[in-house]
Image (spheres, helix red, strand yellow):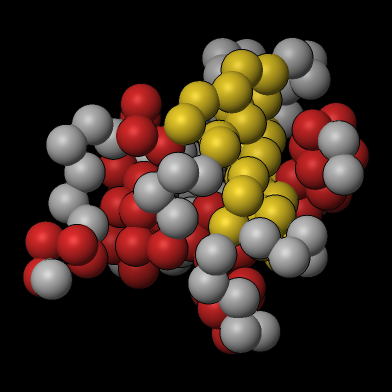
Amino acid sequence: MTDRELIDMAVEAAKNAYAPYSHQRVGAALECADGTVFTGCTVENAALGATVCAERAAVCNAVNAGRRRFRRIALYSRESADYLTPCGSCRQVLTEFSPEIEVLCVRSDGRYVSYRLRELLPLMFSKEKFE
Ligand code: ZN
């Protein structure tokens, strides 16, 4: 799967986002190690702490289906003129399963930049700390 195909899946996922508070409808497409792709979208809540980001929704969908190793994730929001990066909580959740994952941060015009999660979360706190 190309980067563009993965991004297109994130664009589709964003259409289902529920974001009445931030008005930033985010979609994520998560590619697993076996090539399977799971998507997620933002699900906000009036109690803002209960909000689930698109990235975490995609991870939960993948884990629910038995996948725990991921290669890439694409993030998209039509409302983001800047490159969309994951929040701190999502960076931490991605670290749990795939600290080497590639993160495609997409702008509303479709251009994107790629980072390794380790670049976005240096000195990450990971499960290796418990070994
Ligand atoms: Zn997040």
- Furthest residue in direction left, as rendered: 130
Relative side of 128 to 91, left or right = left
Picture quarter containing residue 30? bottom right
Q: Up-down: is 113 above or below 116?
A: above
Judging depth in this view, the residue of 16 and 74 nearest the camera is 74
Relative side of 54 to 2, left or right = left
> Is residue 44 in sight in this rendering?
no
* Quadrant of the rendering where the N terminus is positioned: top right
Q: Residue at x 17, y 51 (%)?
A: 125
Q: Residue at x 56, y 14 (%)?
A: 82
Judging depth in this view, the residue of 6 and 49 nearest the camera is 6
Q: So how many labels did they put on this image?
A: 0
Place of residue 99 in the rendered image (x, y in percent of width and height, measured from the top left): 39, 49
Q: Residue at x 53, y 54 (%)?
A: 55
Judging depth in this view, the residue of 74 and 109 nearest the camera is 74
Relative side of 18 to 15, left or right = left
Q: Up-down: is 122 above or below 51?
A: above
Place of residue 104 in the rendered image (x, y in percent of width and height, measured from the top left): 62, 31
